[in-house]
Image (spheres, rainbow, N blue to C red):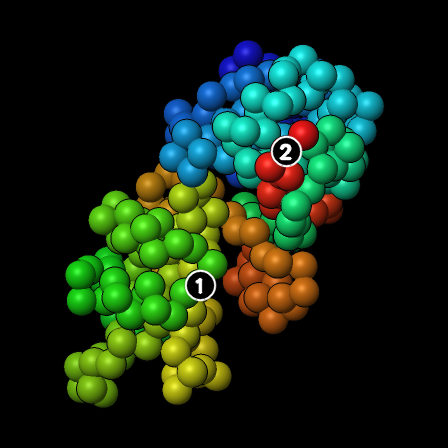
Amino acid sequence: MLQQAKVYFEKNKRLFIDMQECVDKGNAELLYAGADGVLLFDKPSRIMMFAADNKASALAILGRFPLRSIGEKHPFIVAHGEETRLAVEESFGIERQTACYQVVYEKSEPIALKGALNFKKAGKEELPIIQREYALESPENLERLCAQGKIYCAFLPQEQGGAFVGFIGRHPEGSMGLLLIFPEYRRRGYAEELEGYMTNVILSEGRVPYAHIIEDNYKSVNLQKKLGFSVADEKVYWLRLKTTI
């Protein structure tokens, strides 16, 4: 199934880059891979990712599995494209959904930084601040990501006081995010500098930088474009399935 999955991802590299990266890093349990779609389980984040040619294909793929078992074990599915989202909704029902643009840095050269900030991996001193300020990941996930070296903090140079100005990182499934600049340091270009730094870290690991941007976060989408990221032609949907089917 591995080769079949990789062939399928070639149909739309931008839309499927998160699934491709999951497979390439060896984090995927492939549940189905064929000419009509791919369904996988990302082991680090414990979420499912799903892509299919159309709603009928998606329903047929889901029909291969006991739906109750999927819903109970894996309450989150990232559906790629509206047709796949509709199939998941019809099969399980959706308790909550978040539509996102998937953006991808397709270049090989690193982003030029301005040198306005110093960076280091988040440690025990920064963790409580990160947990207090960032609400889109659980405190447990944030602690785990810090321990794994997945969150980076930005500081002013020592000659400017060395203040902690913000942070960025990667979510458990690998997407770039967790970006936050503290209010008193905004509108200085620090978000662009932090994201450029994180992009370069991922490139240095031989990986493809990508992110999921909530659909109404236009400022973030514009920032990605400014940095040279491309936007997939369809959205991805983070779906929390209904607890009972």
User: Furthest-front residue in view?
Assistant: 244
At x 56% / y 61%, what residue is drawn?
A: 224
Badges 1 and 2: C-beta atoms under 8 Å apart? no
Indicate left or right for 122 with 72 as reference. Answer: left
Residue 244 — which label? Answer: 2
Q: Residues within 10 Å of mark 1 (few under 14, many from 20)?
A: few
Q: Tell me residue 12's x, y (percent).
A: 67, 34
Q: Residue 83 falls in which quadrant of the image?
A: top right
Indicate left or right for 110 with 87 as reference. Answer: left
Q: Disc 2 on helix, strand or loop?
A: loop
Task: Please say whether residue 163 is visible from this viewpoint.
Answer: yes
Q: 22 or 160: nearer the eye?
A: 22
The quadrant of the picture occupied by the N terminus is top right
Indicate left or right for 132 with 223 as reference. Answer: left
The quadrant of the picture occupied by the C terminus is top right
At x 78% / y 32%, what residue is drawn?
A: 90
Q: Which numbered disc, 1 or 2, marks the residue that appears first in the sequence?
A: 1
Q: Which residue is identified by label 1?
A: 135
Q: Residue 53 falls in which quadrant of the image?
A: top right
Q: Disc 1 on helix, strand or loop?
A: loop
Q: Tell me residue 228's x, y (percent).
A: 56, 58
Q: Tell me residue 74's x, y (percent).
A: 52, 31
Q: Tell me residue 32's x, y (percent).
A: 60, 16
